[in-house]
Image (tube, grey):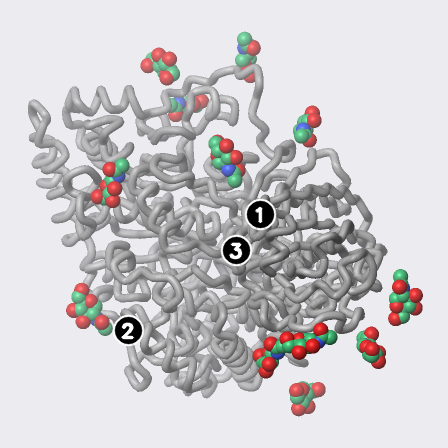
Amino acid sequence: MTQLQAIVAAASVLSLLSPGADAWSPTNSYAPAKVSCDGKTGLTRKGGSISDAEASWLAKRDPVTSAALKTFLDRVTSNFADNSIVEQIFSQKAPRAGYAACGGGYRGMLLDAGTAAAMDDRTPGANEHGLGGLLQGISYITGVSGGAFYTSTVAYNNWTSVQEIIDQMNDGDHSIWDLSQSPLNPGGGDSDYTNQLFADVKQSIQDKADAGFKVSLADAYGLITGYYMYPGLAQGGAMYQWSDIQNVDKFSNGEMPMIIEVTAIVPPGATTAGLDATTIELNPFEFGSWEPSINAFTDMKYLGTELNNGDPVNSDECVVGFDNVNFITSASTDVINYITTQGNAMYNSMVAQFQQKFLGNITTDRVDTNIISPNPFKGTTFYDSSSESNELVETDDLFLVDGGYGGQVIPLTPLMRQERDLDVVIATDNSYDTTEIWPNGHSIISTYERQFMDIGKTDAFPYVPDYETFAGLGLTETPTFFGCDGSNLTDLAYVPPLVVYLPNRAYSYQSNISTYTFTYTKEARLGMIQNGFEIATRNNLTDDSEFASCIGCAVMRRKQEQLGLEWPSECDRCFQRYCWNGTLVNNTTPISSSASNNGTSTTTTTTTDGASYVTELTTLSSSEDFSTIHFETSTTITCDECEQPQPTVTTTTIEEDCSDSQAQATTTIECEECEEEAKANGNGNHYTTYTSMTTTTEVCEECEEAQATATGSANTNENSNGSSSGSSSGSSNGSSNGSNESSNNSNGSSNNSNGSSNGSNGSNGSNGSNGSNGSNGSNGSSSKVSSSVPTILQVTTSTPTYSGFSVVQNVNAANTVGITTGLTVLAMITALMGLF
Ligand SMILES: *[C@@H]1O[C@H](CO)[C@@H](O)[C@H](O)[C@H]1NC(C)=O
Ligand SMILES: *[C@@H]1O[C@H](CO)[C@@H](O)[C@H](O)[C@H]1NC(C)=O
Ligand SMILES: *[C@@H]1O[C@H](CO)[C@@H](O)[C@H](O)[C@H]1NC(C)=O
Ligand SMILES: *[C@@H]1O[C@H](CO)[C@@H](O)[C@H](O)[C@H]1NC(C)=O
Ligand SMILES: *[C@@H]1O[C@H](CO)[C@@H](O)[C@H](O)[C@H]1NC(C)=O
Ligand SMILES: *[C@@H]1O[C@H](CO)[C@@H](O)[C@H](O)[C@H]1NC(C)=O
Ligand SMILES: *[C@@H]1O[C@H](CO)[C@@H](O)[C@H](O)[C@H]1NC(C)=O
Ligand SMILES: *[C@@H]1O[C@H](CO)[C@@H](O)[C@H](O)[C@H]1NC(C)=O
Ligand SMILES: *[C@@H]1O[C@H](CO)[C@@H](O)[C@H](O)[C@H]1NC(C)=O
Ligand SMILES: *[C@@H]1O[C@H](CO)[C@@H](O)[C@H](O)[C@H]1NC(C)=O
Ligand SMILES: *[C@@H]1O[C@H](CO)[C@@H](O)[C@H](O)[C@H]1NC(C)=O
Ligand SMILES: *[C@@H]1O[C@H](CO)[C@@H](O)[C@H](O)[C@H]1NC(C)=O
C-alpha cells in the first residue's frame, strides 16, 4: 500500500481534491455511506426538461460559450467579403454547440483527444491551422466507451487540456494515459505495484460489499481503469465521486463544458442490450433517461438510495458516495457482458476466474454488468404507458452495459435533445466497422434509424444515407455535414442540430489500430493524437484552407435559418462541398453493413527479449454458426537472436463447439533451429508456441553450444510430456534450469486461463521445463521461457450489428511479467474493453 501510494504520488500530475475535502467520499473509501435524508423527498423527477441545476449551470455557461464562439467565428469569417452575419446572430441569440466523442477503445480515446486538441485554443497551432477556440465555445461533451475515457479524464482532472496531458506524457511513470502497460499488468516489471493495485481494487470492492451494496466485475473494471485516468488521486480515484464535479470551480462557474456519458440498460430477463434498449445519460447532476420507458431522472449524488416514486423509503437512510467516478464511468465502458453473452462454457469459465480474483467469495447478481441497486426509478409513473411496459420502473435493480451496445458508438442522442437546444454537434467516428478498422457509417445510421423505433420516438436525428452511399461518395473519408437544411427536417420529431461528422482516416499516423491493442507507447499515443488533430482540421487546413470557415458556417447555420439572415456566398460554397445533399449512389460492390466482414489482419509483437512474432488473424464469414468459436491463427515466430531469423509459420484452424469441448485446440509451433554461430554464443533463442483454445504459450529456448549439431530443433511437443496435448505442459519437470534468468515473461500467465484448455496450463511449468528436455535432440536446452499469452480467438457474435464477429486477442506477450493465475482472463476482458 505505502509503496503504491508513493509511486502514485510521485507520478501525480494533477490533483483535484485531497482526502478531507468536502467532496471526498464520506467513508474515505470506495464504500458508499448511509446518511440521514434530512427530510429530502422527490429525489427523482419527470423527464421532458433539463434539471433546474442544469438550467442554472447553463445560465453561467452560455455567456462563456457565447463569447468564445463569437471570437472563433470572427476569426474564421474574417476572410468573408461580408461577415456581418456574425454580429447579426450574436446581437440576438448565440448558437450552442456540442462535441460527441466516439468510442473505440484506446483508439477512440486518443483520436477524440486529438480532435479536442484541434478545437482547443490551449493547443499550440490550433488557432493558426486548426479550429482553436471552438472547444471553448462548446456547451456539452458526450462520451461513450473509449470516448468516455477521454471525457472522464479531462473533466475529472480539472478540465485539463490535451496539451497538458501531452506535456507530462511518459512511458512507465503512471502519468495520465501512460498506456505503456496494460490493465492486465499495470506495473510492468514492477510486480509489487501490480499486486498492490489489484489488492487495493479487491479491498475496495470488499468495502462496498461489506457496506451492503451489490458489486460485480464492473467495479473492478472501473477501479483499474481509474489508475490510468487519475494517477494523481489516491488509488486512481477510488474515493472520488462523479457528482463531486459540482464542487469544482471551473465547472460550477461555467468555465468548462458539461460532460455526459451514455450507458444502456439490459432489459429485465435479457442477457444484453440491443439498439432498442433504453439508454441512460450520466451527467454531473443526474442519472436518468429521456426515453419513454423511463422518462425520469434522479439526483446523482443520492444514487444508491432506496426510493419509491422518488421518496426515500427510509428517511434516515439516504446513500451518498455510491456514484464513484470510476464506477459511473464503468457503466458507459463496461463490455464484460459481451463475453458472457457468448453463451459458451469457456467464456463463462474465464469470467468465473476473473470473479474469483476480484470478488473472492462475494456473491453477485449479475457479474458482467454495472449494477445500480436499488433501482432509483422504482415506483415512478413517468414512463409512457401507451407504448412501454412498466418493467423498468418495477424491477429492483438496473443492469448497465457499455453505451455503444446496439450500435450507437457515437454518443449523439443527449446532444440531439430538443430540450438542450443545440445548433451544431461535432462528432467523431472512430468505429471499427470494416475489416481494416475504419468506420463505414454504421453508428450514425443506427442513431438515425433508432428515432423511428418506439424507444427513439422522442428523438430526432438528421437524414443520413445508406452504407453504399457512405462508401460511394467517400463520406467516411472526409468530414461531412448532415442536416444542412433545417427546412428539410420538419418531418422529424423536431428539427435537430446540424451534425459535423469527422470519420477516422490516416493522415500522419496509421490510426486504424486494433481495438484489442491495449498498450500504446508514448510515440504511438502522440501519433494518434496528432492524427486526430489532422482529421478535425483536414490535415491542418492544407487539404482545404477554407475548412475552418466551413465549420464556422456549420455553427451559424441554424441561427441563420431561424433568424432568416442572408447566407454568405462563402458558406454556400462550403455547404456544396461538405453537406450530404440527399444523393444516393448504387454501388456495385456494396460494403457490408454488418456480418460479412472478413479478411486478415496482422499484428507484430516484440517480446522483451528482443524477438518478435507476427500474428495473423483471418476472420470468418458471416454465415458461421454463432454458437461456435473459431480460430484461424497463423503465427510467425522469428528467432531474431539467431544469425538468420527463421520464421516458422503454422496455421491452425479449429472450429469446435465449445459447449462441450475442452482443450482440443492445442497447437505447437516448432521453432527453426538456430544457426550454429548463434548457438555458439549462447544467445540463440528459440520460440515455441503452444496454442490452445485460450492461450498461446511461447517458450524461448536458448541454444546451447552442445547442440550445434542437433538436427531437431528444440521443440516441444511430443517430447514434453503433455505440453502438446493441451494438458499442462507444466508437468514436465524441471529439465532445465534457469527459467528465471530469462526474464520477464515467464511466469506463466497463461496458466490459468480457464480450465478448459489446458494447454495453457503448462506455461508455468513450462518455465523451466519446457519439454525440451525430452527428446528431440535438444536435450536440456531450454533455459528461457519467453511468455505465455492468450491467443487469438475469433468469436462470432449473435449481434450482427456490430460486424458479424469480434476478435479477442492478446498480443501482449511482453506484458505478462509476473502475472498470477486468473489474469489471463483479465487480458481477454481488457482486450474487449475497447470493442466499441
Ligand atoms: C484548476 O485549474 C485552475 C486553472 O486552470 C487552477 O487555478 C485551479 O487551482 C485548479 N484547481 C485544482 C484543484 O487544481
Ligand atoms: C498539425 O498541427 C499540429 C498541432 O499544431 C501539429 O502537432 C502537427 O504536427 C501538424 N501536422 C502536420 C502534418 O503538420
Ligand atoms: C469469504 O472468504 C473469507 C476469506 O477469504 C472468509 O474469511 C469468509 O468467511 C468467506 N465468507 C464466506 C461467506 O464464505
Ligand atoms: C489499416 O488500414 C490500411 C489501409 O486501409 C490497411 O492496409 C491495414 O491493413 C489496416 N490495418 C489493420 C490493422 O487492419
Ligand atoms: C449532390 O451531391 C452529389 C454528390 O456529391 C453531386 O454529384 C450532385 O451534383 C449534388 N447535387 C446538387 C443539387 O448539388
Ligand atoms: C430531405 O428529406 C427527405 C425526406 O423528406 C429525405 O429523404 C432526404 O434524404 C432529405 N435530404 C437531406 C439532404 O437530408
Ligand atoms: C439504385 O438504387 C435505387 C434504390 O435502391 C433503385 O431504385 C435504383 O433502381 C438503383 N439504380 C440502379 C442503376 O441500380
Ligand atoms: C469473405 O466473405 C465473402 C462472402 O461474405 C466470401 O465470399 C469470401 O470468400 C470471404 N473471404 C474470406 C477470406 O474468408
Ligand atoms: C507423460 O507423463 C505421464 C506421467 O507424468 C506419463 O504417464 C505419460 O506416459 C507421459 N507421456 C509421454 C508422451 O511421455
Ligand atoms: C519433477 O521431477 C521430480 C524428480 O525428477 C519428480 O519427483 C516430480 O514428480 C516431477 N514433478 C512433476 C510435476 O512431474
Ligand atoms: C542449473 O543452473 C545452475 C546455475 O546456472 C547450474 O549450476 C546447474 O548445474 C544447472 N543444473 C542443471 C541440471 O543444468
Ligand atoms: C531465480 O530467481 C530467484 C528469485 O527471483 C533467485 O533467487 C534465483 O537465484 C534465480 N535462479 C536462477 C538460476 O537464476
Label 3 crowd (10 A; few <14 / some 14-19 / many >=20):
few
Q: Is residue 308 left or right of residue 426?
A: right
Is 15 on the left or on the right of 670, as rendered?
left
Q: Which residue is mark 2?
A: 15
Q: Secondary structure at mark 3?
A: loop
Per the image, the residue denoted by label 3 is 610
Q: Earlier in the sequence, mark 3 or mark 1?
A: 3
Q: Whole-percent x and y of residue 834?
A: 51, 52
Kind of residue at badge 1: Glu
Q: Is mark 2 within 8 Å of ligand 1?
A: yes
Q: Position of residue 706 (x, y in %)?
A: 71, 61
* Residue in the picture at 65% in, 55% down: 686
In the image, is residue 382 above or below residue 317?
Answer: above
Kind of element beneath mark 1: loop
Where does residue 21 sit, x and y in percent of width and height? 28, 83
Give residue 603's quadrant in the image.
Answer: top right
Q: Amino acid at mark 2?
A: Ser
531 lies above or below 557: below
Q: Disc 3 versus disc 1: distance between alpha carbons?
A: 14 Å
Quadrant housing residue 247: bottom left
Q: Nearer the viewer, residue 806 or 608?
A: 608
Q: Any mark on residue 643, and which? A: 1
Query: Does label 3 or label 2 sit earlier along the sequence?
Result: 2
